[in-house]
Every structure is written in C-alpha cells, then in structure tokens.
Amino acid sequence: MAAHPEVETAFEVPAAAALPDLSGLPGVARVDGSTSVRLVATYWDTPALDLTRAGVSLRHRTGGDDAGWHLKLPSRAGGAGRRRTEHRVRAEATTPPAELLALVRARVRDQDVGPVVTLETDRSTARLLGADGGVLAEVADDVVVTHRGGGAADDEARPADDGDVARTWREWEVELVTGDDDLLTAVGEAVVGAGGTPRGASKVQRALGDRVPVAAATTPADGTAAEVLRAYLARHVERLLVADAGVREGDDDAVHDARVATRRVRTALRVLRPVVDSAVSEPVRARLQHAGRVLGAARDAAVERDAFAARLAAEPVELVLGPVARRLADDREAARAAAMADVVTLLDDPAYLAVLGTLDAWTTALPRGPRADEPASTVVPRRVRKAWRRVDVRARALADAGDGQRDDALHDLRRAARRARYASEVAREVVGRPARRSARRARAVQDVLGRQHDGVVRRATLRRVAVQAHLDGENAFTYGRLHAAEQQDAERAEADAAPALRRALARGHRAWMS
C-alpha cells in the first residue's frame, strides 16, 4: 500500500470557460501540453454515508496511471487548499482491500460498505513546470457525469441505464506536486479571474448532494447546556476519528492527538455530568479513561525517547561514556513498541468501537440528563467552577505535603489544572474571552508542572537503565549526569510554577463562573 499527501483546490467553471495562461506565475517556467484520459470511479460507503460525511473517500478507479483502490483521509496539517492523505492499492479486487478498510474502521465499525455512486470523468491535464523541469502542480480540466448507485469496479464499468444519470458539471482541479502554498494561491487567483468558483466539497460529496447528512449547526452562545456539550463533543470526537488512521500506522503525533481528544471528551462529560443521562455516559467515560491510559503509555515512551536523544546530543562527546544512547533508545523504543501493541488491540476492541459509535451518535443527539434543557449560560459556568475548586483543593494539599509526598501532590495539581483548562474551554462558546483567559491560566500551570513530572519519570528511567548498565560492566557516569540535569530541570519547573499557580488561584479571572 502506497500513501502520499495530497493538496488541492477545485473550482466549478462554466462549460465554455477557457483555462487561463498560467505560464507567467511566479516559479512557473512553462506549462506542459495537456494529456487526456477517461476515468471511471466507483465510490463505496456505509448506508448512512459516514465516510462521505467526514470528507473521506473510498473508491475503485479505472483509467489513468493510478488505477486501483484509493482511500483519501483528511489531513491534520493546516495550510492552503484541501489537504488529505491518499492511500493506494493497485488491485483489481471487486471489494475494498482489508488494509484500506482497517484505516476507516473507527468510522465504519461493524457496518457493511457498498458502492454508492459512480463518476465518469473526461480529464485533460496540464502540468506547471519549474526551471529545472520538475512538476510544480497539475491542473486538471474535468467534465464529470455522475450515476447514482454503484457500478462494477473493472475496466468495463459503465452505468447500465442512462436514466440513472444524476448530474453533470465541469471543474478545474489544481493539485500541488512539488510546488508550495503560494503557487496554489496564485493559480487559484488566476482561475477565479477566468470564471472559476471555488468548490469546497469533493466530487463524491457533490455527486451525492442532499443524500449526505448535514452536520449540526454551530451552537449559539444563548443555547441550552445540551447544545453546547453536543457541539463540543462533535469537534473533539471528529478529531479523535481523524487521528485514528495515523495511530494505526504508528504516527506518534496522531497518538498524541487521539490522547488529547480522548481527555477532552472525557472531561466534558464529567464537568457537564447533569446534562447527559449518567446511566449511559458513565460507562463511556470509563472506557475513554482506559483508552487514554493505553494511548498515554505509547505517547510518553516516544516523548521520553526523543528527550533523551536530544539531551545526549547536547552533551560533550568526551562525557558520554559507553553505549548510553543505544541503551536509552532501545529501552524506550521497546516500551513504545509494547505500548503500541496494546494500542492496536484497543483500536480493534469491539467495546471501544462501540463507544466511538455512541459518541458519534451523541454529536447529533445527546441522551438528555436533568439539566440538558437549561440555559448554557447558567449551567456551564457553575459546573466549570466545580472543576476550579478542585485546583484550590490540590493547591492546599501541596502546601501541606511533606518532602516524600511533594511529587505526588504536584502531579495531582497538574491533573486538576488540566481538567480546569478543558472545562474552561467548554465554556468558551458561552462566555467567550473570560473563559479563554481562565483556560490559559490553567494551561500555564499544567505545562510547567508537566515539565516537573517529566523530570520525575525520566529520573526513574535513568536510574533503572543505569543499574542494568552497571551490572553489565559498563560505566554509569553519563547516566548520573543526565539524572542530575533532569533533577535541575524539574526543580526549575517547580519554581516556575509558583507565579503561574498564583495567577490561576486569583479570584479575579473567575468572576464569570459565579
């Protein structure tokens, strides 16, 4: 299976429009002549069109030089144009390959997928070349005819009945190859000047039209508590689902994104507990807590591995005695590999997939609790205030903690600050700037105490690995230096936490919670 990033923009154009001269754009040395091809693509989806609704496309295409199965997933990266990651399998199978279905299991879950629409595209492609002859971008002039329902996924695929034709249109599609966002913007401006109208939807979304479920509207600031929670869940459940494919492929950043989304969803359900029927929300929260621990183990091992590598790279060469880098890298990579095995088990666990299905359903309709229909402006600030009171409690516990209890007390305070931060973020739609200010103050405490906690964990790893190195007859000197450096960083972080904590504990920024 091959994968590559895709960055493109599309424009609807009149049937008689002429493609503008693009040879004078910055960086473009010349425009290569057009090549023409007929493409036939059959798109597959669940009965409810879960993939299309999420901007995911799964298709089998004939014609061109990339015939076979394609899966396009939304990218987590920002920038100009629509960004997706395309996975290709050059196979003539009549059903989607298992490796592609695995990447959308979080959305498909236990549902069947089948053909939903077939597109015939007559495409002419021009290539924008740089001074070195390399391809900067491709501009496709497409005439598209859509046919509702599926078709055979082979070279003879053709709709059986012209009466099935749903619609036809013409569009220009600009896809970057080695060019940058500035070129994409410049081409877009030229195309708009020639009569093009930017089109945000993909071909399959346009083809299916009103069959694609419409996402619920953004929550108004004066809505009910249930509306605010539903909108917040919709954003972060989607982030969890977007990260899922990357997690399955072992992407450490995707693991981080999934972990954060899991925490945010769990915190929102806890903070606004009276808004949802607790009989169904508490089991979901428990399952999310387990998922967060599994994802966290993999993420933490990767972060620790990279942190040790960076610290060793900064050490004078003459002070690195023995195979320290290899030992630490092997130890943390082994921990990460074991944790990722647990992550893969989690992602395919029917219970976890069922929770994802439940959460996806809640983004449209929540199981309502006793305070669901009360004004968000009343319910949300009061519930957030309870999360902040936990910060106060943990701060008092820290002040009373003895030397042997201090690290645990700081860790508890960090977790309370994280919960207060996420709770304040839930309130932003209702309260606005004051809630954002409170979230920033909680995050400052969370971040600095995160550095302190990292030092505690890394010192434990260094001591364990150093003992093993010593038993194997190696010099443990460098481990001692690293241990001392981690301790100094943790002590500095604890000192830096004092002003951040004072700002978080100040009552002025919490007035909106009354």
Image (cartoon, rainbow, N blue to C red):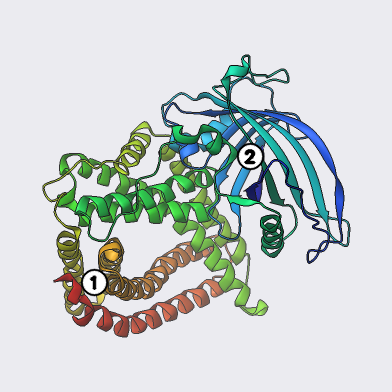
* 492 left or right, relative to 307: left
- Inspect the image, locate mark 1, and give the three-letter code of the amino acid beneath it: Gln
- Nearer the N terminus, badge 1 or badge 2? 2
In the rendered image of this protein, does residue 406 appear above or below residue 363?
below
Q: Which percent across, then down, holds residue 187? A: 71, 58
Residue shown at 35% from the left, 46% from the top = 216
What whole-number distance in Å separates the C-alpha atoms at marks 1 and 2?
A: 50 Å
Q: Is residue 512 shown above or below 39?
A: below
Q: Is residue 106 left or right of residue 103?
A: left
Mark nearer the viewer, 1 or 2: 2
Camera-nearest residue between 241 and 174: 174
Give the residue pinned by disc 2: 87
309 and 43: which is toward the camera: 43
**Residue at the top extreme?**
160
**Is residue 320 at least partly visible in the picture?**
no
Q: Position of residue 214 (x, y in %)?
A: 40, 41
* As drawn, 2 above or below 500: above
Tell me whether circle 1 and circle 2 mark residues in contact (CB < 8 Å).
no
Image coordinates of residue 383 in percent, x first then y, are 17, 61
What is the secondary structure assignment of the residue under circle 1?
Answer: helix
Element carrying mark 2: strand
* Image location (x, y in percent) of residue 148: 55, 24
* Amino acid under disc 2: His
Query: Which residue reaches farthest front?
Result: 16
Which residue matches tag 1?
405
Question: Taking 32 as reference, is 370 left or right?
Answer: left
* Residue density around tag 2, few if under 14, some if 14–19, many if 20 or more, within 10 Å: some
Q: Residue at x 31, y 85 (%)?
A: 499
